[in-house]
Amino acid sequence: MFERYTEKARRVIFFSRYEASNYGSPYIEAEHLLLGLFREDRALAERLLGERNVEPEIRAEIERRITRGQQFPTSVEVPLSDECKKVLDFAAETAERMGHRHVGTEHLMIGILRVETSLAAQILIARGLEAGPIQEQMAKDHQRAHYRSVTTSAKSAVSTSAAQTLDSFLAGLRYLKSEDLLDFFALNAECIDGTGKRWNREEIGKGFDTLFAHYAKKNASYFVEAILTETRELFVATVLWKNALLASEERVWMHRMTVVLVAEQADWKILLSQVTAVQSSSPTAL
């Protein structure tokens, strides 16, 4: 069903499954899809709604209007509701009509708006969003893309996409399964852990929990410390982690992750991830 989805659109589905389990819902509903969309493509939501960090306000409104159930593990499969299936059908139909080969996050947003009886659509429509104008703007943007030469703005757009991919990977360490996260890595990717050991992609897949499970801890937090390189083909950033304890050095509670991403066709992939210790002291020292 999701073969034509872009990586970002597929991750929206993964995140919506997490949202359903978090709220104890037996089905993935349109509102879970909307929250998944906010998690994966924050820039799209902010651009359409015209305000930054609107997700907490919309989440609070959803929580006021739903009945919360008992939270269950994300490993439990959650089916799509009939309403959510309609959203995905409309998203695919929109992509077909516009001559787009792939279903992306913009198509999902239009799909949500077209199911006007859904809670997600009601919240968005109340904020002034309509499917028609968004689709018209998408058509204009798509047309311009065919004739646009390589400019500084295009270069910036590619770099922004790399930053979004990095953000999705970091957030997904807590919410996505290891097999889903492995898709972020290039075929020749390497990881260098805190002990200096090198892992190739096959080893990363087999030992994913050993490498990354500690980033899923509830008190683990991160922020992008610096962007070191930003070109059309290469993106390098450093990420500072707190309270993500290394299995080999329990005293190391803060460390730096350097991540190198390379452009592969229409997507960005992680080529290298290297972890180095920053501080070896008790977290209460700060």
Image (spheres, rainbow, N blue to C red):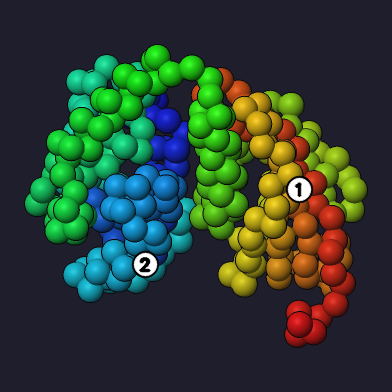
Which residue is located at x 54 percent, y 40 percent?
160
Tag 1: amino acid? Thr
- Residue 2 falls left or right of residue 243: left
Place of residue 145 in the rendered image (x, y in percent of width and height, measured from the top left): 39, 21
Query: SS of the residue at dot 1?
Result: strand
Q: Is residue 206 above or below residue 6?
A: below
Q: Quadrant of the C terminus?
A: bottom right
Instruction: Say whether residue 33 is visible.
Output: no
State how far apart marks 2 and 1 are (Cα). Answer: 29 Å
Q: Which one is in front, 45 or 180?
A: 45
Q: Which residue is mark 2?
A: 56
Residue 225 percent coordinates (x, y): 69, 57
Residue 218, above or below 33: below
Q: Earlier in the sequence, mark 2 or mark 1?
A: 2
Q: Is residue 52 left or right of residue 179?
A: left
Residue bearing the label numbered 1:
258
Is residue 84 among the parts visible in the rendering?
yes
Labels 2 and 1 touching (C-beta < 8 A): no
Q: Quick one: which residue is furthest to the right in this view? A: 196
Quick one: SS at disc 2?
helix
| Mark 2 nearby-residue class (10 Å; few <14, some 14–19, many ≥20) | few
Residue beneath the point at 36% across and 33% down? 104
Residue for point 23% across, 73% down? 64
